[in-house]
Amino acid sequence: MKAAPSRAADPKAGTLGDLSERARAIFRDIVEAYLATGEPVGSRTLARHGGLNLSAASIRNVMQDLEELGLLAAPHTSAGRMPTERGLRLFVDAMMQVSEPSPEETAAIEAEARASGASLEDVLARTTSALSGLAQCAAVVVAPKADAVIRQLNLVPLAPGRILSVLVGADGTVENRILELAEPLPAAAIQQAEAYMNARLSGMTLADAAARLKAEIASGRAELDRLTAGLVEEGLAAWSRDASGPVLIVRGQAHLLDSADVDRARLLLEELETKAQLARLLDEARAADALKIFIGAETKLFALSGSSVVAAPYRSADGRVVGVVGVIGPTRLNYARVVPMVDFTASRLSRLMGQA
């Protein structure tokens, strides 16, 4: 499993080739300790517990070199070092070793993905909640929105050129749209449009209904005048525009409040409310062939909170990408554990979509 890089490498950044074996070992120990504790790591700690067989002074010299390469930073309140976002990027791209999710983790995800008697959207939401609980982060899924099946369509005149369109779906849902027409229509044309839609299009999806209308108009079988046909087309187009967008489901935001940095957690919660921007960010993972990792300021959305996103696309039975699943949390995510967990969840959702 290989994660797709999220940004072009910074030419000024340190690369793996810039590091000696000693520097790599020290850098890896610092990053792993920081990801485990969230605290800066000091040279004495590494000398005592790192298994490096080096003096604290030797380790400090290497840490200074790593800092000059932009891979480590020294908070002003501590003599220890912590990885920069650039350092984390180098670690996850070139040094991180991941393993398969545990049987307990896969079983928890499988249990929700196999839930019977629930809608696809509900299964996706439950699976995402399971991923959130396992990763102890917020989790997100971009779910394909099912094309509504028409049971009944009603057209209610409100004012000249304004009509309320009421769609009753086969699942019992009722939604309203306001149609703004280029020119007013007589009541007879509105009634004819409503009668045609209910007689000819009931039981069809919006996409299939639009295709039938187009075919019947082209063949002369629609038996509609120009104004009435235009109203039917505009009504179907209004519903189709809204029905085609994906559904964004976010679960587990409360896990973010467990962070030691409460201010950053609050910023992240505010950023998660900007769902349009979050959907655009996840579109980058949707377009990728593999899992993607976004770290901190690599995305404008999470630049303030310094958060990370691990996301992977999932596919339909024909291999087409239909959605994205991932987790969102602080930059000190346990990437080695979270990455394979997200990858497994995406794989399981792909299997679910193949069965749908």
Image (cartoon, rainbow, N blue to C red):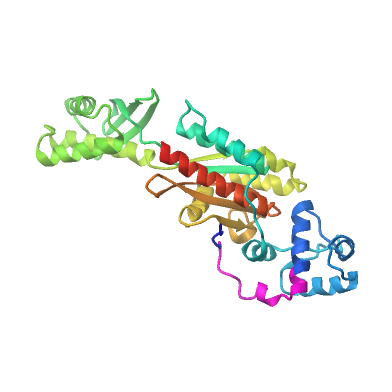
Residue drawn at (74%, 61%), measured in percent from left and top?
A: 31
320 falls in the magenta region: no
Residue 349 visible, this angle? yes
Quick one: quadrant of the N terminus? bottom right
Q: Main secondary structure of the magenta part?
A: loop
Q: Nearer the viewer, residue 311 or 76?
A: 311
Q: Position of residue 227 (x, y in %)?
A: 17, 36
The image position of residue 250, as x and y in percent, is: 57, 40
Question: What residue appears at the point 80 percent right and 65 percent down from the top-left corner?
Answer: 74
Q: Which residues are magenta?
A: 6-24
Residue situated furthest top in the rendering: 172
- For the point 83% across and 67% down, which residue is it? 52
Quick check: 252 left or right of 218?
A: right
Instruction: Say above or below: 167 vs 299.
Output: above
Dividing the picture into quadrants, the one containing residue 245 is top left
The vertical placement of 292 against 167, above or below, is below
Locate residue 342 relative to residue 168 in the image: left or right.
Answer: right
Frontmost residue, 83 versus 196 = 83
